[in-house]
């Protein structure tokens, strides 16, 4: 056997977070609370930056699900961060339609500018850059998703520079 | 934090290029939109919710029965806009009538087929058309609860749809006793979080139940065993958005604006090597050449090489074939491909087909849910072989093996993702085999 695994306990959920969870749970029949698991995990990710084992447990307890069923969801869907990422996660689409319209070049430009490899995080913990599959905004290519919730369109090199510089300044 | 939001907002698309370009032909869903008029009052001013009012008999008329609504849909020739093109009226008639328990209605807005971005613009700029369409469908099938499953990557669209639902609720178009009638309909928005497979309807149901999005065996079909095991109908966003127009103007009028067996307008998401990528709503049966012209032609005045006419899963068609096609289910099927979701990927004569297939093959490998062996293993084999060919390590036998692996995936999986991965491979080999063979030849010479 490998080294003993540290036991994990559920992270506390703030009242505000629980209120957000409750709003999602209310959409489904009372006996189907599990339907809210994707939304709850994405709320956790928005607030904490990633989905930690402690947070998976907290969601499992809140929804009355086996922890493993929550973990299955975290690991199945591409957008959940299973490890901490930078303050800003930048996902650049490189799928075929974007490949014809500068997606891979945008990814390269970002990596060069930030001095990271794809999937890497800058030393200051500010940016993580990831290539991604279709974001569903092919007409706006090059497109980039920032922190799962903000689509940025027509991202020429100039605009990428503006965005990165702007976010850096805003966080200083 | 507020400052961050401000910066990000500067880069948000406004829809001008993709939707408000004024180059649609007789649009029904995108008609009169400008980005600012997505709200309830504007939708009503465009004639919105008149169809719902009509069927529940709150417009001074007698209302319509469930059968009358379904008959109107059948007469319209509306076919599913998500990819399969199944007749909508027929699908609605499959829902059990006398079923005593809960029935559900689901909208599939998990728009992840590479090349497609039409539902995004519908939900962002005309969300009430989808809400009204869903309410009409719910009435026709006796479903009192609905969910709209929205692609997780377009979160702003999800937020917009939630805001529109709230408006519709306040105005009495949703909830208990819609517009004072006895019809009840609750509607909720649900978002995905990055899984192409959830566009498959039974994977979507699993996901909606809070599980991994792995497709279910069919039968049983969702109409008998769907969400939470209850009778469920799932339609695409654009299908629902087309419905109010049909009820307002009648099924025959809708059929007339398309061509026989292909009623109505369809939104095409055209991208790749064109001057003006975007969504174009045009009558079904419009020549491909006209669509290409609307999109400004091939970028940089280059020559058209090939088109993938219905999303990345549909077989590629060389220029000489697609230029003879009209954009409708039957014409594209006859040419050996599929109209699919209406994503039209245009490639100019500088495009390398091996490189293109390599990217698509990677996508299907990445998105296979892992449930069926032929797909889970086969998509990896396909990708690795195409990668070998692209990187100068191809072997002469690879082309036959590629085709053989693709053939052995097709029809041997629970859902259509296997076919979706295999079809592009087979079509590329059929039409552009020489490009693959040339790379293999070059590799062989290099080795010798």
Image: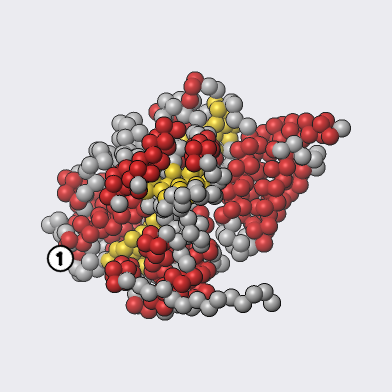
Chain letter for mark 1:
B
Q: Which residue occupies the foreground of this view, A158 or B65? A: A158
Q: Which residue occupies the foreground of this view, B432 or A44? A: A44
Residue B416 x/y as whole percent: 57, 55
The reply to whether residue A150 is in sight is yes
Residue positioned 49% across, 34% down in the render: A101
Residue, disc 1: B180
Q: Which residue occupies the foreground of this view, B360 or B433? A: B360
Residue positioned 49% across, 41% down in the render: A114
Residue positioned 54% across, 49% down in the render: A120
Q: Which residue occupies the foreground of this view, B330 or B413? A: B413
Residue B396 x/y as whole percent: 80, 39
Q: Residue furthest left?
A: B60
Classify B352 as above or below B413.
Answer: above
The reply to whether residue B419 is in sight is no
Q: Secondary structure at mark 1?
A: helix
Q: Quadrant of residue B316?
A: top right
Q: How is the image coloured?
A: secondary structure
Residue B355 x/y as whole percent: 63, 37
User: Label 1 neighbourhood size at 10 Å, few (<14), some (14-19), many (20+)?
Assistant: few
Q: Residue furthest right?
A: B448
């Amino acid at each position: 056997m490998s080294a003993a695994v540290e036991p994990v306990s559920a992270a506390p959920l703030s009242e505000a977070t629980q209120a957000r969870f409750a709003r999602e749970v209310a959409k489904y029949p009372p006996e189907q609370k599990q339907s809210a698991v994707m939304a709850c995990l994405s709320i956790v990710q928005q607030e904490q930056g990633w989905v930690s084992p402690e947070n998976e447990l907290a969601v499992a307890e809140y929804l009355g699900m086996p922890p493993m069923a929550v973990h299955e969801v975290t690991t199945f869907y591409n957008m959940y961060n299973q490890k901490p990422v930078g303050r800003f996660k930048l996902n650049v689409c490189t799928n075929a339609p974007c490949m014809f319209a500068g997606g891979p070049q945008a990814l390269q430009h970002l990596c060069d500018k930030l001095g990271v490899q794809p999937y890497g995080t800058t030393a200051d913990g500010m940016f993580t850059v990831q290539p991604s599959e279709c974001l569903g905004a092919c007409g706006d290519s090059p497109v980039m998703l920032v922190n799962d919730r903000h689509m940025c369109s027509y991202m020429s090199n100039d605009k990428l520079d503006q965005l990165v510089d702007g976010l850096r300044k805003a966080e200083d | 934090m507020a400052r961050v939001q401000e910066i990000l907002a500067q880069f948000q698309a406004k829809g001008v290029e993709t939707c408000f370009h004024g180059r649609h032909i007789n649009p029904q869903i995108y008609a009169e939109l400008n980005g600012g008029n997505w709200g309830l009052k504007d939708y009503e001013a465009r004639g919105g919710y008149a169809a719902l009012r009509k069927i529940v008999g709150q417009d001074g008329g007698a209302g319509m029965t469930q059968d009358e609504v379904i008959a109107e849909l059948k007469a319209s020739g509306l076919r599913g806009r998500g990819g399969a093109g199944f007749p909508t009226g027929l699908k609605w008639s499959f829902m059990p009538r006398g079923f005593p328990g809960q029935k559900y209605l689901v909208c599939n807005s998990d728009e992840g087929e590479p090349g497609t971005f039409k539902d995004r613009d519908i939900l962002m700029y005309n969300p009430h058309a989808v809400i009204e369409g869903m309410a009409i469908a719910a009435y026709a099938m006796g479903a009192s609860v609905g969910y709209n499953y929205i692609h997780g990557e377009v979160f702003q669209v999800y937020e917009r749809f939630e805001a529109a639902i709230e408006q519709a609720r306040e105005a009495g178009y949703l909830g208990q006793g819609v517009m004072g009638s006895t019809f009840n309909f609750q509607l909720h928005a649900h978002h995905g979080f990055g899984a192409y497979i959830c566009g498959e309807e039974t994977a979507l149901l699993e996901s909606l139940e809070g599980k991994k999005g792995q497709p279910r065996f069919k039968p049983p079909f969702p109409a008998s065993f769907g969400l939470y095991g209850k009778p469920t109908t799932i339609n695409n966003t654009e299908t629902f958005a087309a419905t109010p127009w049909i009820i307002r103007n009648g099924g025959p009028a809708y059929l007339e604006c398309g061509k026989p067996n292909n009623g109505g307008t369809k939104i095409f998401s055209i991208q790749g090597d064109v001057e003006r990528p975007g969504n174009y709503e045009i009558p079904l049966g419009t020549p491909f050449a006209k669509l290409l012209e609307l999109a400004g032609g091939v970028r940089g005045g280059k020559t058209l090489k090939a088109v993938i006419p219905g999303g990345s899963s549909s077989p590629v068609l060389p220029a000489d074939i697609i230029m003879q096609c009209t954009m409708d289910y039957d014409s594209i099927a006859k040419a050996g491909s599929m109209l699919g979701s209406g994503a039209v990927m245009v490639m100019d004569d500088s495009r390398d087909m091996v490189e293109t297939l390599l990217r698509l093959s990677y996508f299907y490998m990445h998105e296979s849910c892992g449930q069926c062996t032929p797909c889970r293993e086969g998509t990896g084999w396909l990708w690795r072989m195409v990668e070998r060919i692209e990187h100068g390590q191809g072997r002469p036998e690879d082309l036959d093996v590629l085709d053989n692996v693709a053939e052995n995936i097709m029809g041997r999986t629970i859902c259509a993702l296997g076919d979706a991965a295999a079809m592009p491979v087979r079509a590329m080999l059929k039409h552009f085999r020489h490009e693959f063979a040339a790379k293999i030849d070059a590799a062989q010479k290099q080795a010798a």
